Amino acid sequence: MSDLDLQVLDRRFAAAKEASRALGRATTSTKDGALEQVSRLLRERVGEIVAANGGDLDAGREQGLSTGLLDRLTLDERRIGAIADAVLEVIGLDDPVGESVSGRSLPNGVRIDQVRVPLGVVGAIYEARPNVTIDIAVLALKSGNAVVLRGGSAAERTNAVLVQLLRDALDAAGLPGDAVQTVDDFGRAGATRLMQARDFVDVLIPRGSAGLIRAVVEQAKVPVIETGAGVVHMYLDESAREDWSVELVHNAKVQRPSVCNALETLLVHRAAAERLLPPVLARLEAAGVTIHADEAVRALRPDLAPVTEEDWATEHMSLEISVGVVDSLDDALAHIRRYSTKHTESIVTNDLANAERFLDEVDAAAVMVNASTRFTDGAEFGFGAEVGISTQKLHARGPMGLPQLTSTKWLVRGAGHVRG
């Protein structure tokens, strides 16, 4: 990267930093006004967005992008309308900035309060997900943060339109458009500079494949909130109801297989295998799912492809699933401990003790009983949208909404107090 390119990028980062100060002081009504403009412009410019997205999709097909990635990349009129609706939902959420976390008065009369404040400038690196451009920007703006975005080459045309839309919405609301920046036009070099911009960027959030997240974690100098790939499991316990098992597995795998909360591995208790596997697998196969099965499953269905060690550790992001039989809840827990990416895990059971043990022992951002893994989502959790699903344990874990885009500071009020 040339010195001139570095100067251009640093000017963008500096502009975002300056804009973050104005956003941090903005009232809730002003920020909500900007979000109303975002929702309005999404509907008004739907044709422009779809046209740009069509160019990205054509390029993606030529480059051989997988079906799952093409699905993630797609923005049609229906999806854009849903994004616009989600922006309006964020308006209805409580503004976390200024919220009191704790407070007390000391015996000497000094008052101490801990309040929420914006993080400042949030960097985001993500792949082939133009909806994330809006999700991250809207949540950042509502929580008083500026954003610097790297949306990847696969969605470059779509993201260019969306970034300009966001900047126009801010300008129309009387807030600085510089609060939304992109480094997409500098490619990988821009992403690298973003990862190193400690003087300007307060936190970096990667969202995408395991490889992308690992690369950001290893290369970044900016503090990182790690979101994780989803090697997601569902365990059908010995007591699991057949009707629930069929519906839950189908929904978790088939509803939208390209997303991180989709089911990738199904485990079934050996005592329930002959009862549950035939209807569960039949429903999956009717939906076009390719099944990778272990020896116990293939004893019932010899025609299925054998599962490999690599399959157990794979986030397929497509209509593929790995299926295995285990002898006990202990074995299911051991398998999950070995292969889980700590995103979402679910048990289907009528045994209360097993349900509570699963909830207690599984180490993941979201742990579920008798529910589809597809519920691990910011909108479903009432956040309106999400920045990502954090699979780490520091600062934030699980779907990240408005509160997770804030830090805190301590306010100390005295009247000439000195420490004795």
Image (spheres, rainbow, N blue to C red):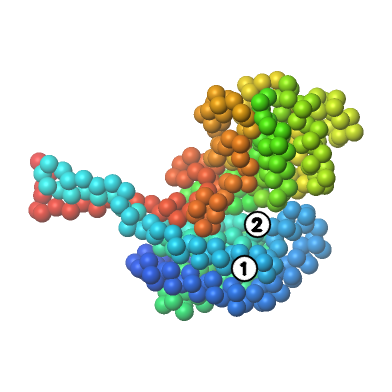
Q: Which residue is the site of mark 1? A: 81
**Of 321 and 216, which appears nearest the observer?**
321
Q: Is residue 366 above or below residue 116?
A: above
Q: Which residue is the site of mark 2? A: 127
**Of 28 and 408, which appears nearest the observer?**
28
Mark 1: amino acid: Gly
Q: In this view, does 310 lie above or below 148?
A: above
Q: In which quarter of the image is the C terminus?
A: top left
Mark 2 or 1, nearer chain start: 1
Q: Is residue 53 above or below residue 370?
A: below
For marks 2 and 1, give the CA distance: 21 Å
Could you say where residue 315 lies in the image, as x and y percent from the top left? 70, 43
Instruction: Find residue 241 and name its label.
Output: none
- Inspect this view and state whether residue 187 appears: no
Side of 127 relative to 111 (left or right): right
Q: Is residue 130 above or below residue 231?
A: below
Q: What element carries label 2?
A: loop
Q: Which residue is drawn at 53% across and 28% down?
A: 356
